[in-house]
Image: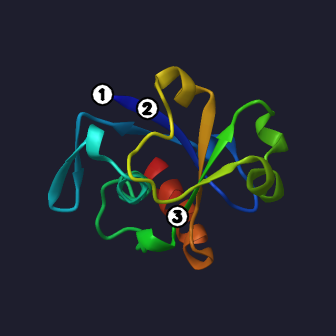
């Protein structure tokens, strides 16, 4: 494993129990392709997160990955302080980059949280899906 990212879904209520991790491996399955960690791009990360959110079930939660917005937020505030306004003011929106270097190393990744902003209509479907998988 090359890196572990801490993620949560942006919603009306951000609950720590809704957070999840995403493992980035030396080689990552994205669709029908294998993408090496050294070749990952933000768009690839969106697909990897999509797979984690839907729990591997291809019938669950349909998300257009191009409509997903990712934010990198330093975890120097308590989880209760996270609001959409704070995220957008203090966070860094992850957009196209020629290389995947949002974190220099795992220690830097541990100090941050990736906030996943889904298209509005799909957020409630994701929470319902993740809750169903826990039961």
Q: Nearer the viewer, residue 15 or 106?
A: 106
Place of residue 96 in the rendered image (x, y in percent of width and height, measured from the top left): 46, 59
Residue at the disc numbered 2: 4
Q: Secondary structure at mark 3?
A: helix
Spatial CA distance of label 3 from label 1 is: 26 Å
Place of residue 80 in the rendered image (x, y in percent of width and height, measured from the top left): 82, 41
Residue at the disc numbered 3: 126
Side of 130 where 57 appears, left or right: left
Spatial CA distance of label 1 from label 2 is: 8 Å
Return the residue found at the far top: 107
Disc on the earlier residue, 3 or 1: 1
Q: Residue at x 34, y 38 (%)?
A: 24
State the colouring used for the structure image: rainbow
The reply to whether the C-beta atoms of the residues labelled 1 and 2 are less than 8 Å apart is: yes
How many residues crowd mark 3 within 10 Å: few (<14), some (14–19), many (20+)?
A: some
Residue at the disc numbered 1: 1
- The answer to which quarter of the image holds residue 57 is bottom left
Side of 86 where 74 appears, left or right: left
How many residues crowd mark 2 within 10 Å: few (<14), some (14–19), many (20+)?
A: some
Disc on the earlier residue, 2 or 3: 2
- Residue 131: mark: none
Q: Secondary structure at mark 2?
A: strand
Place of residue 29 in the rendered image (x, y in percent of width and height, measured from the top left): 21, 50
Vertically, is 55 above or below 75?
A: below
Q: Residue at x 76, y 38 (%)?
A: 79
């Amino acid at each position: 494993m090359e890196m572990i990212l801490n993620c949560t879904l942006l919603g009306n209520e951000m609950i720590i129990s809704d957070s999840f991790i995403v493992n980035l491996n030396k080689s990552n399955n994205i669709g029908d392709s294998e993408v090496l960690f050294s070749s990952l791009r933000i768009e690839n990360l969106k697909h990897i997160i999509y797979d984690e959110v839907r729990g591997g079930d291809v019938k669950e939660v349909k998300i257009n990955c191009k409509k997903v917005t990712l934010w990198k937020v330093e975890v120097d505030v308590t989880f209760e302080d996270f609001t959409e306004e704070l995220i957008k003011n203090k966070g860094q929106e992850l957009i196209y980059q020629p290389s995947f270097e949002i974190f220099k190393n795992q220690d830097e990744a541990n100090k941050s949280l990736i906030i996943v902003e889904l298209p509005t209509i799909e957020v409630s479907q994701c929470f319902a899906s993740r809750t169903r998988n826990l039961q």
